[in-house]
């Protein structure tokens, strides 16, 4: 249970380049809500325009049939979700979708493939895709599973701007969600991506039955990476029928907003993305997330396989809140 701290003056904030301890992060997390949000909004204003939100758009370039057993995922071949598997999409189809995304205001195009890791011929194909999407003037991001150093070097040389690879939860809770790869495997790929010179997009999912401590510890791992990720997606679990987490107890909105605020305080110069799960959030909850320091979203009515708010709903929300696309 959350115990509210009542002495805000003694709550520590590590100086830049200092490692966060679990205790320090927890003592910020448990601040009275108003103090936590004030701190998060103050940190946000030091580094960002508080009324600008970066827009990314996703495309699933290879759907389903994935050999990993991630307990949340519609695309795992271990779960009977009824999703049909596809092959890698043609570059022409991807470019046509990317062009529409750009016309809709997205500045970054994120492409996901349901692979454990890319095979050599997959890398050749995605390198062609990176070049074609970049030629439209969009930033590119890909999430293709585990990468070895040679693969990440090749993607970096091809001009891929970001690589998304989430740690998903705390190291302690990770084996309750995924058994086919380890937390250490995730960190190894993140290290390869960083060493290759690409920007890192790394976050996780809330609402998988983890404790509040697990959520805070996930942020401690992210903030303590040799360099924090430039982009931190915070997903709210979209429960998928047929997966082991289909009936997970939903996370409360206040607990969700606390984690967004803590992410903003612990990684003040990173973009914090309010990612999957917005369709199940009220405008008020999203408004609180933006106030707590979220400054990026996915736009478009589909994420990879699951739904996301319609463009018109997001336009209306931005008008109501006076927000503008970055
Ligand atoms: N196969 C690649 C991998 O796992 O690294 C990339 C695709 S994977 C679908 C990208 C991320 O989406 C996952 O790491 C997870 O954080 C998020 N995600 C997947 N299914 C989700 C769900 N049902 N609800 C919320 N987030 C989800
Ligand atoms: C991330 O953290 N969230 C995005 C992106 N990275 C690739 C994916 C969300 C997937 C939501 C479930 C689905 O569409 O299947
Ligand atoms: Fe595969 Fe990624 Fe889904 Fe895990 S999250 S099952 S690795 S597509």
Image (cartoon, rainbow, N blue to C red):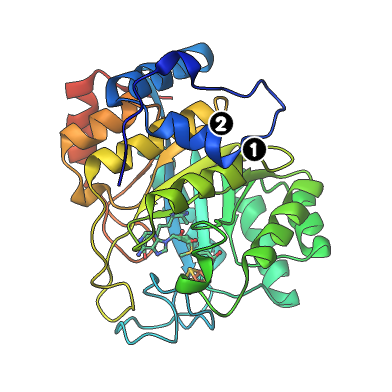
Q: Is residue 15 visible?
A: yes
Q: Secondary structure at mark 2?
A: loop
Name above or below for residue 288 compared with residue 67.
Answer: above
Q: Residue 51 shows which numbered tag?
A: none
Q: Earlier in the sequence, mark 1 or mark 2?
A: 1
Q: Quadrant of residue 147?
A: bottom right
Report which residue position mark 2 lands on. Answer: 267
> Measuring 35% from the left and 38% from the top, which residue is drawn there?
104
Name above or below for residue 18 compared with residue 70.
Answer: above
Q: Secondary structure at mark 1?
A: loop
Q: Quadrant of residue 286?
A: top left
Q: Which of the two residues, 238 or 324, is positioned nearer the viewer here?
A: 238
- What quarter of the picture does the C terminus occupy? top left
3D distance between C-alphas at marks 1 and 2: 7 Å
> Measuring 33% from the left and 28% from the top, which residue is drawn there?
290
Q: Which of the two residues, 26 or 118, is positioned nearer the viewer here?
A: 26
Q: Is residue 183 left or right of residue 192?
A: left
Report which residue position mark 1 lands on. Answer: 228
How many marks overall? 2
Q: Is residue 137 visible?
A: no
């Amino acid at each position: 249970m959350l115990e509210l701290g009542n002495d805000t003056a003694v709550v520590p904030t590590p100086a830049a380049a200092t490692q966060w301890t679990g205790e320090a992060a927890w003592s910020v997390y448990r601040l009275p809500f108003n103090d936590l949000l004030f701190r998060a909004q103050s940190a946000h204003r030091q580094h960002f325009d508080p009324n600008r939100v970066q827009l990314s758009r996703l495309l699933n370039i290879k759907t389903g049939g994935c050999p990993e057993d991630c307990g949340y995922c519609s695309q795992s071949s271990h779960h009977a979700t009824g999703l049909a598997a596809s092959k890698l999409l043609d570059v022409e189809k991807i470019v046509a979708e990317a062009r529409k995304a750009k016309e809709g205001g997205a500045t970054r195009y994120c492409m996901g493939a349901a692979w454990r890791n890319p095979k050599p011929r997959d890398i050749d194909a995605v390198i062609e895709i990176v070049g074609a999407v970049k030629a439209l003037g969009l930033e590119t991001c890909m999430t293709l599973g585990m990468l070895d150093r040679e693969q990440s070097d090749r993607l970096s040389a091809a001009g891929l701007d970001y690589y998304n690879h989430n740690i998903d939860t705390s190291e302690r809770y990770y084996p309750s969600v995924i058994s086919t790869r380890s937390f250490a495997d995730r960190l190894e790929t993140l290290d390869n991506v960083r060493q290759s010179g690409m920007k890192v997009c790394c976050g996780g999912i809330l609402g998988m039955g983890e404790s509040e401590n697990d959520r805070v510890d996930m942020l401690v791992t992210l903030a303590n990476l040799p360099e924090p990720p430039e982009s931190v997606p915070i997903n709210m679990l979209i429960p998928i029928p047929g997966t082991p987490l289909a009936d997970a107890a939903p996370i409360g909105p206040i607990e969700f907003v606390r984690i967004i605020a803590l992410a903003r305080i612990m990684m003040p110069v990173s973009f914090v993305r309010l990612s999957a799960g917005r369709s199940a959030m009220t405008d008020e909850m999203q408004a609180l997330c933006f106030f707590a320091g979220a400054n990026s979203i996915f736009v478009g009515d589909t994420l990879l396989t699951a739904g996301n708010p319609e463009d018109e709903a997001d336009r209306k929300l931005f008008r109501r809140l006076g927000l503008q696309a970055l």
